[in-house]
Image (spheres, rainbow, N blue to C red):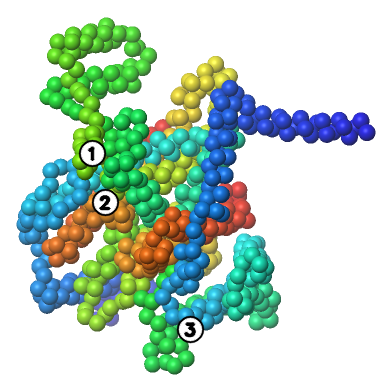
Amino acid sequence: MRLVLKNQHIKFNVVINTIRLNLFNSPLNTILTCVLFPLITYVVFNGVSWIFTEANWQGITNNKRLFLIGQYPQEESWRIQIVLIFLSYILGILASLNKPVFYKISIGISSAIFIIGLFPEEFMQIESTTRLWILSIGAGIPLGYFTRNRFHLNSGKIIILGSIGIILSYILLRGLKNSEVIPYVSTNEWGGLLLTFFLALIGILLSFPLGIFLALGRRSNLPFFKGISVLFIETIRAVPLVTLLFMTLIIVPLLLPEGWRLDRVGRAVAAITIFSGAYMAENIRGGLASVPNGQIEAAKSLGLNTFMSLYLIVLPQALRNVIPAIVGQFISLFKDTSLVVTIGLLDIVGIGKSVVLGNIDYINTQAEVYLFLAFVFWIFTFSMSYISKLIENTLGVGKR
Amino acid sequence: MFLIKKKLLYRNGIPFWRDSKSLSFLAQLLSTLIVISLLGFLVTNLINAANARGFSLGFGFINQEAGFPISESVINYEPSNSFLKAFSVGILNTLRVAILGIILSTILGTFLGVCRVSSNWLLRQISVIYVEIFRNIPLLVQLFFWYFIVFQALPRVQTAIELPGPIYLSNRGIFLPFIEFDSLSILWLIPLTTIPLLLILKHKRLHHYLFFILFIALAYGISFLQFGIPVSIDTPVLGKFNFAGGIRITPEFGALLVGLTVYTSSFIAEIVRAGIQSVPRGQTESAYSLGLSKNETLRLIIIPQALKVIIPPLINQYLNLSKNSSLAIAIGFPDTFFVGRTMINQAGRAVPIFGMIMLAYGVMSLIWSIIGNFFDHKLNKGKA
């Protein structure tokens, strides 16, 4: 009995000591704590009560579809569902590759999807068809996870499958001219989160190889390739993204013959890709510089040619060393997609600013709409930086 | 015959199609040709388009009358001024917001970075939350937030919020009292510049200059008694429709400045934290054991070492801030890019004006990279 009491006493002391060490360890800190604590309580309490009582979230709840897919025709939205199921299937396959990072990501995403899909009807009203779609997207992940071994998919096959699938998804989303089943949907009608994700994903997929090429060019011994890469990288890095977006909008059509016209979304993708590619090149160059010369020499003495030694020896090591920087670049690319608002595209920010707040009914819900937009971006960027930390830990960069 | 052929095609017994030197030469020649023909293709198209649509590619328009107003300007600008002057107004506005933003975000970011390593748990958490929130939200959304929800939602001029100063907050802008100079104000420059310089340079031997400083102070005191203090404070006064006097911070400028400062300071906070944490604990401990005071340790041991880690990424952030100021277009602040776009609409010369915009930003980042290289050189001087 006495022992237990004593233990409790010690535990209590530990708590007190922690509080004292962290909050009241000097006169200045005591004053700070005494000032800050009521202040924080006041701000948090008022903020939370504003969110749940005063704020009018109708602008968002009544426009869910606009925020998600913009002006994309509602009767064609099944295509987006199929693409999402495909993407979750790919994620499931990646999760089964013995890569703890992908495993953790897919666990996180699938549990989030299932929680939303199975949320009790009393708290959140979702139509049963929507529920079914959400759950089917969630089901893609375990499906991919368990079917990989059946199809004997290795990483090479997955890359080929993934790239074919992404091209097919693009065709599916865009539709074919003169087609009954999948009629043409102009990219001008794409919007909302769909457009944001499209720009971010295509930007990432294209700027990564561009960055590798530019980085290799910059380290090349051949003066011409080196010169042109340096010129490209430094010019692009010197100007802000908005100017590039306007350049692809106004100047590039003048440089191409009549008839060679990209649509607006294509121009935005081009600007984002070359902008991000130039930054990516600098990150990858840092990685290339970190690979010891002995590795290249050893590869050569093993009889590998330049391409093979790059592909098998240099690039894997170089990229591994700069994964945090590359993910950081992806995060800023994702944030930068919001700039397409300045050339009149309706990504999620554009939908919020022009469509929802342009409607007279929601004109007084500005604060709510912008907070919602901030929250959406925050969720994605924050989880991306969390994933980056996971990768860093699993690869043990800096620990070897 | 065979010998000539052999000399042309073989070098040291290696045929030219397997010789890396000739191959790399050929590859470069080929890609040079491709690039030149591509450039030629683009330029021909441009000239054709220019001829077909009847626009000119020259810079002849630059001295013509601009014909559009600019909402705020550092220098005197009228719509009847030239395009060149309009563009320089834009550049000056960019510089104004960039310089102020850099100063403010450095102060705020350093403060937050120091809070991050504070021994007070609450302060640390506030800093973490601030950084994680503002770093992860796109600057554009933040600018909309500051502009539409904070600056535009302020009360009208007649019912402006009055803060001590007097500072007035209204939806037409923030009105602050400002120093009004007259012809003798230039005299202030001498003590205002020399005393801080003396303080910095001759930190420990200030008493040698005591008589000098006293003498200057006495001279100024006597002259002020004679002529009156040559500076007055101009306070804003509510007129019929707007405030008169003082200095006005427009909602556009205010929102852009606050947005850039808040966004960049969250990055700077992380840089400062990393810099402080990069100095090993042993350095502090050995400084204490050498008998240095807490203040001296900070000034002589920690800050010089932390700065080596802090300055290069910090300058990169300054460059980012200067470039991000181009988002002013989203909220209508007339910076370089905004004025340039208005000029394109007005003059219809997209290509040369775009060249001017790119050049302006290019020169700005060139200056930053020169500054960065200078510091790199300076900081790494001690290293072998």
Callout 3: chain: A
Instruction: Give the SS element for disc 2.
Output: loop
CA–CA distance in space, label 2 to label 3: 41 Å
Q: Which of A184 and A294 is in front in this view?
A: A184
The image quarter containing residue B235 is top left
Q: Can residue B352 be seen in this view?
A: no
Q: Give me the residue at 39% from left, 40% from top.
A: B105
Structural crowding at the residue carrying mark 2, measured as other residues with C-alpha within 10 Å and reported as few (<14), some (14–19) or many (≥20): many
State the mark number for residue B243. Answer: 1
The image quarter containing residue A263 is bottom left
The image quarter containing residue B40 is bottom left
Residue B289 locus on image (x, y percent): 58, 19
Q: In this view, does A256 lie to the left or right of A51?
A: left
Q: Are marks 3 and 1 in contact (CB under 8 Å)?
A: no
Q: Give me the residue at 57% from left, 35% from top.
A: A38
Type of residue at label 2? Phe
Q: Nearer the viewer, residue A290 or A158?
A: A158
Q: Is residue B265 visible?
A: yes
Q: Do labels 2 and 3 share a chain?
A: no
For the residues carrying marks 2 and 1, which lies nearer the camera in this image? Answer: 1
Residue A310 locus on image (x, y percent): 48, 65
Residue A43 locus on image (x, y percent): 53, 42
Q: Which of marks 2 and 1 is nearer the N terminus?
A: 1
State the mark number for residue B333. Answer: 2
Type of residue at label 1? Phe
Where is mark 3, residue-wise? A75
Relative to B183, is B128 above or below? Answer: below
Relative to A87, is A340 above or below? Answer: above
